[in-house]
Structures are given as structure tokens and as C-alpha cells.
């Protein structure tokens, strides 16, 4: 049994930092349908993201605001993640994905103008991270049902960042080594 039972509250001490090897190797596929334990872990992870974006709770428990969290970021070798973000129109986008796979993507690319950040990285890293503008992702939800998501914009960026975690890739691995602000030709700003 892991410590991530139903009312366990994930805090920054549970977050694995970039030096840990678990963040640099591909994670293992999760058995389906998800076990009760995996469901509890995913629920804890989602609660962490919501708490981290809550002004009161994030201050009280010293949580860094996050929009995505993958299982290996809490030290578990499992191919699953959660994301929670509110778009510019105030609409909430909440995803729990098990064994996700990008099945198709646009040729066009986008990047976040301020660069990307990560709960596992405690330093500020400058540079643009090119991402596909649109992706189609296949995976399984908490109930073990197959789902296909069509994503664009910020959600597309966040989910590619999380799928990269599950493949052992950090966001800075995608920044141009010679010039961190150099972009491919077909890559435009998210906003
Ligand atoms: Zn990250």
C-alpha cells in the first residue's frame, strides 16, 4: 500500500525533484481497469493541483501552484497523470489520464511566451519549449474507460509536458541548446 490513501494530502515534500532518476526514464503502463489504490493516488494528485491553485490553502501549506502532475513526480513508476487548469474564459479543464498516447498531432507548433515551469524543478529556466499546437490523445479515465481527447492551446501544451514526464523527458530537454529562444519555423506564440 502506498501512503496516498483517500485523505492523504500531497505537499511539496512528496514532490520528487529533477535530480531523481525516476524522472529521467519511461514509466510503466498501469494495469486496467485501474485498481482502487491507483484511483486513490490519482484523486490525491488531483486534490494537490486544486489545493495548489487555492490562494488560502497554497499559502497555508506552502504549495507551489501547478497545472499538471505525473505519478513519477511523486515517486511512483506509473504511466498516469492529472491536469487542472482554468482557461482565459474562466472555464475549468480537468483531466485524469492513464496510459496516455498521442495518436496524432498538427504540423504547426506553439510555445508559452514566459517559458515552462515544473513542480520538480526549483530553478528558473529560460527558453522556449516548442509543442504541437493540436494533439489527439488516447488514454483511459478513472473508470477504466477508453477516451480520446482533442486538445489545442494551453491544454495541449500542459498535456504534452505531462506525457513527456511519463516518457522520462523534462521540459528543458526540448529547449534549443545553442540558443534557448530559437524556435522551429512553424512555431508561434500561444498568445
Ligand atoms: Zn513538470
Image: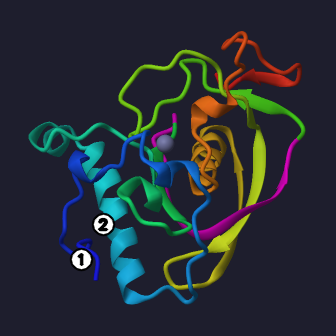
Q: CA distance from mark 2 to mark 1?
A: 8 Å
Seen in the picture, residue 115 relative to 3 is either above or below; the reply is above
- Say which residue label 1 marks: 5
Asked if labels 1 and 2 touch by Cβ distance under 8 angstroms, the answer is: yes
Q: Is residue 102 magenta?
A: yes
Identify the secondary structure beneath mark 2.
Answer: helix
Residue 124: horizontal and vertical position, in percent? Answer: 43, 19
Q: How many marks?
A: 2
Q: Residue at x 66, y 45 (%)?
A: 156
Residue 101: horizontal and vertical position, in percent? Answer: 72, 63
Identify the secondary structure beneath mark 1.
Answer: loop
- Furthest residue to the left? 60
- Say which residue label 2 marks: 44
| Residue count near mark 1 (Cα–Cα under 10 Å), binned few <14, some 14–19, many ≥20 | some
Left-right relation of 182 to 124: right
Relative depth, front residue between 130 and 83: 130
Q: Residue at x 45, y 41 (%)?
A: 90
Amino acid at each position: 500500500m502506498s501512503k496516498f490513501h483517500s485523505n492523504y494530502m500531497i505537499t511539496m515534500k512528496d514532490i520528487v525533484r529533477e535530480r531523481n532518476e525516476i524522472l529521467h526514464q519511461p514509466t510503466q503502463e498501469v494495469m486496467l481497469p485501474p485498481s482502487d489504490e491507483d484511483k486513490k493516488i490519482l484523486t490525491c494528485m488531483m486534490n494537490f493541483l486544486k489545493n495548489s491553485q487555492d490562494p488560502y490553502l497554497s499559502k497555508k501549506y506552502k504549495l507551489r501552484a501547478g497545472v499538471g502532475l505525473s505519478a513519477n513526480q511523486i515517486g511512483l513508476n506509473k504511466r498516469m497523470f492529472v491536469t487542472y487548469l482554468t482557461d482565459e474564459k474562466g472555464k475549468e479543464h480537468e483531466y485524469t489520464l492513464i496510459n496516455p498516447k498521442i495518436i496524432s498531432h498538427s504540423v504547426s507548433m506553439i510555445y508559452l511566451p514566459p517559458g515552462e515551469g515544473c513542480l520538480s524543478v526549483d530553478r528558473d529556466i529560460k527558453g522556449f519549449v516548442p509543442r504541437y499546437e493540436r494533439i489527439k490523445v488516447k488514454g483511459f479515465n478513472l473508470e477504466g474507460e477508453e477516451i480520446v481527447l482533442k486538445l489545442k492551446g494551453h491544454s495541449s501544451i500542459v498535456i504534452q509536458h505531462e506525457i513527456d514526464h511519463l516518457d522520462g523527458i523534462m521540459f528543458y530537454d526540448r529547449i534549443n541548446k545553442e540558443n534557448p529562444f530559437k524556435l522551429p519555423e512553424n512555431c508561434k506564440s500561444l498568445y
